[in-house]
Amino acid sequence: MNDSRFTSLSAPERWSWIGAGAALLGYAALRRGALAIPAAAAGSYLLLRGAANRRPGAELAHRPGRCRLARSVMINRPPDEVYAAWRRLEDLPRFFPHLESVTVRDEKHSHWVARSRLSGKLEWDCEITDDQPGRTLAWRSAAGMGFKHSGEIHFRPGPPQRGTRVELRWSYRVPGAWRGMLALVGEAPGQVAREGLRRFKQWMEAGEIATIAGQPHGPRTRLAELAPLFSPAPPVHEPTPLRPEWLERTGTA
Amino acid sequence: MKALCWYGKHSVSVENVPDPKLLNPRDAILRVTRTAICGSDLHLYDGYIPTLEAGDILGHEFMGEVIEVGSAVKNLRVGDRVVVPFTIACGNCFFCRHQLWSCCDNSNPNAWVLEKLYGYSGSGLFGYSHMMGGYAGGQAQYVRVPFADVGPIKIESDLPDEKVLFLSDIFPTGYMAAENAGIQQGDTVAVWGCGPVGQFAIRSAFLLGADRVIAIDSYPGRLRLAEAAGAETLDAGEGNIQERLREATAGAGPDGVIDAVGMEAFAHSLGGFYDVVKQQLKLETDRPTALREVILACRKGGHISVPGVYGGYVDKFPLGAIFGKACHFATGQTHVHRYLRPLLERIERGEIDPSSIISHHFPLQQAPQAYDLFLKKKNECIKVVLDPWAKAA
């Protein structure tokens, strides 16, 4: 197996990483100041990787592994209506704020643009591989572009009077080292899926998506301004118009 | 506009902030005519509720005049006079449809935070931290009201603001607490805490047919107000509550018990000191000093009602006593929407005058002093009502 994650190091290389790590730690301990914290962090990392007999940085070079996730939500509307709303792919950016746009080219093909805090702008083409109205939609991203993944979403009748059970499944590749960082900036795929489904449910049931973006507040301190950067649920800045079918179908207003 | 903003523990100030705008189609904007400081605002003021951000506008008890409605709000018109429930609810999810309005699935934009703490998130609230939705509150001259087509109740009679304002929170909260006490004919109900929620719990218990209500507190002014509502009173500072309740109920214990004290309980006892220390050391988030006493006092098969507020984790919770006595236990954020219409009718029929518990009026400008007064219970402060438009004295 030629996987650098699992290859042992030669003794001289191993001891040189440990030595470098110890030297950085020593530097941090003796010379306090602005550099001490990064030096201590880098030193600990090198020391631990050396001790574990693995080359530092190997996780970055590693080919991304395949990940799968499934997230589901119960939506208090019938399956046909829920499917139809999801099938308007150009509306999906309302629920997934990392998506900038979805352009539908034809029945099967669409073009997707997303913006990630970590990797910047991502673009990919998508092809629908299975489409059963009121039940299932499956798709796959084109090879070699943007977010490489395939996905499917199922709409099944829930228990009596409970609406539709919606299950979203993604299968994707993300480099291992990125996964932790994605979670830090609120872009871990599991969080993105969960928050997207939550907003989709709000749109279906309440006709709009709950938001506080744009409401007044007193002067903020610096720390409070930073807080939204780490939210897995970035605020929807575009006000959402009412879901067109909402008034007639829910009949509440 | 002017609004009361939170800046940290025991630090609030009135700031000039932008006026609120309609953000969603089901929003409305109110010109606030009266607002109040709630006992639960003191938990924010004391810094016990996390995820507030400096600059957040507080306040969840308010009423006002509609000045703008979103495109989907068909039941309100500009000029309508409304009281707004402090819980924000969509009206269409499973929970709203089952009258569990404070459990609404669709009104908390930050539900993920509360899910980490509670497993699942309740509804969004006005002015009560970002994990509860982060909605700007109503201790301000104007406020944005989401889902205005299902929340606010129109006041069409000429009842003064002071008589209907408390429909927004404490009257329904006290009423639901009394409902949760499972009152039957002939019942004796004991209420710990004679602050605003306790006062409404006492009055509601009588409305629901309680034979006797025993009110417990250590502030003489609050006990007098409870007495005026027909309750018998026990001063918590004067000896063993358990013994005195046992005697008062001929050895049986109260049929229903209500903890209207919540997470910042005080007690003149070793137990009370224990909780203060543990909370300061962050070993527990809430002080369940009153709750333990409530549970121990409940009669066998009786009803324990907890209107709260509790926020996190408590220690030495006497679950064995609840089990061993086969008690019912009911709690929860108030499903305010349920109670608006029936309680407004009770006010209109003159069965209750909610304004009787107001002890102080202030202009919004002086809200910081009012918070301090209410926290320290100075000048027999029980309930403060703020006028957002009055000039500071």
Image (cartoon, coloured by chain):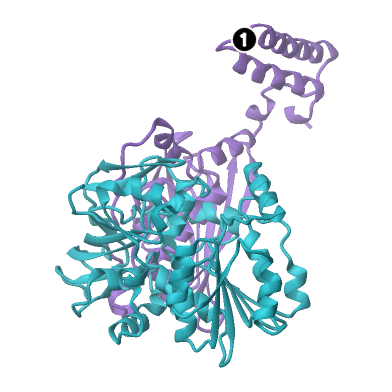
Give the residue type that dot 1 points to: Arg
- In this view, the residue in front, B385 or B23, is B385
User: Quick one: quadrant of the N terminus of chain A?
Assistant: top right
Q: Image quarter for residue B72?
A: bottom left
Write the residue at 55% across / 84% down: B212
SS at mark 1 in the image: loop
Query: Which of A111 and B96 lies nearest the eye of the viewer?
Result: B96
* Furthest residue in direction bottom, as rendered: B185
Q: Which quarter of the figure has residue B298?
A: bottom right
Residue A99 drawn above or below residue A20: below
Packing grade of label 1 (10 A; few <14, some 14-19, many >=20) is few
Q: Is residue B100 visible?
A: no
The one of B155 and A187 positioned closer to us in this rendering: B155
* Shade representing chain B: cyan
Q: Residue at 40% across / 47% down in the picture? A: B372
The chain coloured purple in the image: A
* Residue closest to the far right: A11
Q: Eyeballing the image, is B215 above or below A200?
A: below
Q: Position of residue A94 (x, y in %)?
A: 36, 55
Q: Is residue B318 left or right of residue B119?
A: right
Residue B188 visible in this rendered orientation of the protein: yes
Residue A135 drawn at (x, y percent)? 50, 72
Q: Residue B136 in the image: state x and y as whole percent.
A: 34, 52
Q: Residue at x 59, y 43 (%)?
A: A173
Query: Which residue is under mark 1?
Result: A32
